[in-house]
Amino acid sequence: MNPHPNGSDISFSSPQTPAEGDVHVHPTAARTAFPKGIEVDLGSGATTYTDSEIRARFVDRAAQVVLEDGKISVKKIETGYEFKTERVVPKVGLMLIGLGGNNGSTLVASILANKHNISWGTKDGRQSPNYIGSLVRASTLRLGVDPAGKDVNIPFSDVLPMVHPNDFVLGGWDISAMPLDQAMARSKVLEFDLQRQVAPLMKDFVPLPSVYYPDFIAANQEDRADNVLPGADKQVHLEKIRQDIKDFKASNGLDKVVVFWTANTERYSEIIPGVNDTSENLLAAIAKSHDEVSPSTLFAVASVLEGCPFINGAPQNTCVPGLIKLAEEKKAFIGGDDLKSGQTKVKSVLAEFLVNAGIKPLAVSSYNHLGNNDGKNLSSQAQFKSKEISKSSVIDDMVESNQLLYKRKSEMGPGAKKGEHPDHLVVIKYVPTVGDSKRAIDEYVSELFCGGRNTMNIFNQCEDSLLATPLILDLAILAELLTRITSPTTSEEPFQPLYSVLSLLSYMLKAPIVKEGTAVVNSLARQRSGLEQFLKACLGLENGTDLLLESRVW
């Protein structure tokens, strides 16, 4: 490990683990039997394999619908694609902004526990490490049916070659200089016996100095800010972050680095023409140290300029229009916003269920209280506003899908800004006593048959960081995978990277950013289905259906 200027280590790579075959390894942490992904034989040469790549041809079938003069016209659309996936998984670094926070310290400790297969004592007995809660590591994908008609499901991580979380080289920044063993203890997330065992592996690691602009986070965070880059010159800060990434990559012999914002929620940045609306203006604003350039946007710009995928795991509008333009120009990758770990994920499922069942939600009221540092920061109104915005849009597309239940904008009368929508309230309160064990209470009031009313209440108690950490891993794993998938835009052009905004990551995010002009999908089922179908398309596989025609016809 190489020292950085403040005397702490620039990166963290844990000692080699014993051979995993020597002890029991949880299935979610086990090495795949298909390190280069599964191989499918389509019998037509549509998918080919070499040691280095998978090439697959795929036909996307859609329906274009036109409503005109009271008639519905449907035209079948078929578009051919070819995908190339690099099969060799590179050596990947994961740099976290907010490394010493609850999520960052929990992620490092949990990877160490899995890598060394460290079990620990609890009041219920011995607990083994695992990656439960991870879509990639702990869920399966339906590949098809066997000759007897039974479903064949395989681990999600087997579909295409993906980095194992144990293999991430970890590093990052934090405004607090606290070594990670102490940061882990401060967070109060993990069981004491696990902390005791992983602390010796974490004690020598101190985060890199980070960017601290007090205007963007709550004033109550000032006492933690003892590890910050000096001065207020944002161009200097940008160059320092870029150098940190370069040094981290070089000193660890990495092929790729993924950068992830898991630090404090910031206030929203004002979108100002001439400041952050284009790539040129954004870079010029950084050079002038403009007040509306946030720390998270600075890290995102540095990542894009270094060719590293950047994921925003917080609700603020990090990905301003100028950043998106810059990513497009550099063919770099960005994703966001805000980890979707508990209450919002349930809300998207329940709202879709009600609307699809023909029941009309009239009001959704969401109340949270938590006592970790995230809750402390969100007790400031400007930072809460960012969270409120990201939580509030989650049911929009479900409501817009059913004009039988909800009036369209055109039916709402003069001056209406949008169509009919349920009342939607979000409240977050800081209660130090409960620590990381967040309480989420939701009330759904819906209209039933002939004017009836239904009220459902859900009480959810969860460990906030233990839900969030697997999502960080999923996002980092999938972001890296997507950098290895290319496709030609036309038959005459060479293979090109995917589009810069990684909307395929929407399943893990509250307020997904998408390509300009395309619809935001918040339905959890559709988000998951879209990701599954894309991975299958990279193998040339048709998307499975639930028609089950063999059981419907004679």
Image: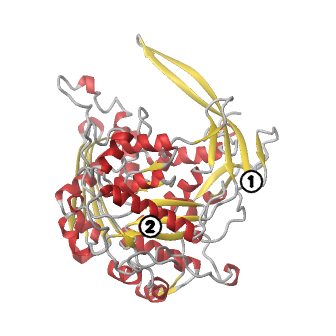
Label 1 sits on residue: 52
From the viewer's perspective, tell me whether residue 227 is left or right of residue 37.
left
Q: Position of residue 178 (x, y in %)?
A: 34, 80
Query: Alpha-carbon neighbours of circle 1 within 10 Å: few (<14), some, or many (≥20)?
Result: few
Q: Does the rendering let one see residue 507?
A: no
Figure label count:
2
Q: Going from the N terminus, do you reach mark 2 or mark 1 first?
A: 1
Q: Position of residue 57 (x, y in %)?
A: 71, 37
Residue 36 found in image quarter: bottom right
Residue 275 found in image quarter: top left
* Viewer-nearest residue: 345 or 31: 31
Query: Alpha-carbon neighbours of circle 2 within 10 Å: few (<14), some, or many (≥20)?
Result: many
* Looking at the image, residue 466 lies above or below residue 76: below
Report the Cα–Cα distance between label 2 and label 1: 31 Å
* Looking at the image, residue 59 lies above or below residue 303: above
Helix, strand or loop status at disc 2: helix
* Viewer-nearest residue: 224 or 36: 224
From the viewer's perspective, tell me whether residue 342 is left or right of residue 364.
right
Report the disc number at residue 306: none
The kind of residue tagged 2 is Thr
Q: Position of residue 210 (x, y in %)?
A: 34, 67
Helix, strand or loop status at disc 1: loop
Q: Position of residue 489 (x, y in %)?
A: 61, 33
* Viewer-nearest residue: 357 or 384: 384
Q: Does the rendering let one see residue 392?
A: yes
Rendering colour mode: secondary structure
* Looking at the image, residue 213 lies above or below residue 422: below
The quarter of the picture where the C terminus appears is top right
Q: Residue at x 67, y 79 (%)?
A: 20
The kind of residue tagged 1 is Ser
Residue 37 found in image quarter: bottom right
Label 2 sits on residue: 469
